[in-house]
Amino acid sequence: MLSVMGAAILASRILVAGVLLIAGVAKLADLGGSRRAVVDFGVPERLARVVGVGLPVCELAAAVALLVSASARFGALGALVLLLVFLAGISVALMRGTEADCHCFGQLHSAPVGWRTLARNLLLAAMAGFVVLAGWRHPGISATHWVTRVPAASLVAICAGLLIVALVSFQMWFSLQLLAQNGRTLGRLETLEGMLHEINGALGLAQNGAAAGPGRLGHGLGGGGLVVGSRAPEFELDGVDGERHSLGTLTSAGRPLMLVFSSAGCGPCDALLPTIAGWQREHAGRVTIALIAAGRRERNLATAGEHAIERMLIDLDREVSDAYQARSTPMAVVVGADGVIASPTVGGSEAITTLLAQAARPALAIRQHVPAANGLHNDAAGRSLLPPLDTSRVGEPAPELELSNLDGERVALKDLYAQRTVAIFWNPGCGFCQKMLPDLKAIEQRRIASAPRLVVISAGDADRVRDQKITSPVLLDSESLAMSAFGAGGTPMAVLISDGRIASPVAAGADAVFALIRADLRPTNNGNGA
């Protein structure tokens, strides 16, 4: 029989070990969140990766040690040290008024630190300290001691039961994941249907041959918020750049405006922030993206600096979020250049990503990819269903810019103009670009002497471009400067440059790009009958 003291020590060991075990496993399952959490608590960025991994490992080691009698005293001491460190970090965060996310149990439970977090850790530290003081000489029996007294047949039955419970739990988890994936797939299918509807509307076609109206942004994404077509609420907020921004200034460039609503201390928002920073640079010429950030100013300023986010506006009291009916975070809505609500307000990173893709999609590039009923983009009378391409730039001097190649070297575009050149505007994440990649590589391999030189000017991630193994020179246009200078509104597009001047309209879509390239693919006679 256990004494009262022995039972109290054993119960304290099991409880502290259980909490540390769950916390350690949960943190290891979300190392990215663990790294962000330790940075929020003041750990330098260069040490965050090591601390983010080392912390859950220490928690697991202390938990295992607590369960075994021979190492229980050392496990309790290790747990006490960890909990005291946690208490110090939480106390500093509370005194500074920061909203650091504790990430105590990974994705199982994560919330900004508060007095409840402090009280929980104080209780656990007291229990660990009790085990250290009262159980240093006699920590009691091992938590697994009962196993040695169970008959072999019963032990086998217990293990089989636990295995069945584990399998059933896994099956339930897998089924839930499958249902979630099915829901996401259905959402994507609805989005694709909406895109096809938009394309048909842009071409003036419908499935039954009748005229069709244009599709709408956010189709298939659900959402709510303000009524599409209503006037967007006016606002004026301070930005992290020190300037005042209003709805009028954000739409003054004549581009659609996407407002992304976030909150300091929101885990999903923090995970989305680096992506938003990339979007702001990649889609600068097509969509203006502004972040409406609620919560403490200091936390938002630090976040904007960490991820180099532009146009972050501080919505301290959530007045703008409430006006746009963004009840949770992250959420987003698109406002037209005319100040009218152009989409429902959607929530979650996946829906926001899809909404941005819809808002940034160049209509001309889509139309070039979709054949009309007779396959020639013409109606029954032979008239073109597509708007005529702009030829006003033909004959003008080609823009002179400097871009970086994949090795980080600066290259002046004018140095490429000495040779007849086709500049292809590219994005490795563009589905149309990916589809035309094999044909592009086939053209590269032909190496016909009379062909124009191909230069790929790419937005998007440089590593993804490298993975595509394009052999032509690749220049990075992360801010879409070259695309804007040449008048290319999307990808894939291309333009011919000859004698330093623009020699063709902008070709939009794979077919038009290849037609532009092949126009000069004239095999030469090299004396060998080739």
Image (spheres, rainbow, N blue to C red):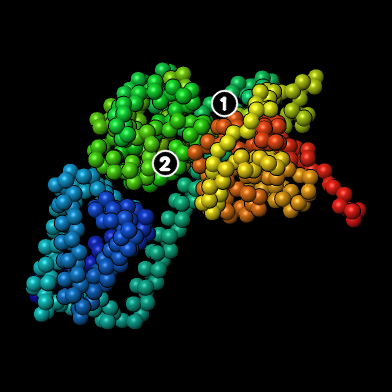
> Which residue corresponds to mark 1?
215
**Residue at x-position 24% and y-position 53%:** 42
Q: Residue at x 43, y 20 (%)?
A: 339
Dot 2 crowding, Cα within 10 Å, few <14, some 14–19, many 20+? some
Compared with 109, 361 (above or below) is: above
- For residue 268, which numbered disc appears in the image? none
Most foreground residue, 317 or 20 = 317
Give the residue displayed 32% in from the left and 52% down from the top: 36
User: Residue beneath label 2, please?
Assistant: 277
For disc 1, the neighbor class at 10 Å (few under 14, some 14 to 19, many from 20) is some
| Badge 1 amino acid | Gly
Residue 350: x and y in percent read: 46, 41
Q: Position of residue 152 (x, y in %)?
A: 34, 82
**Amino acid under label 2?**
Ala
Relative side of 285 to 224, left or right: right
- Specify whether 11 is left or right of 375: left
* Quarter of the view holding residue 426: top right
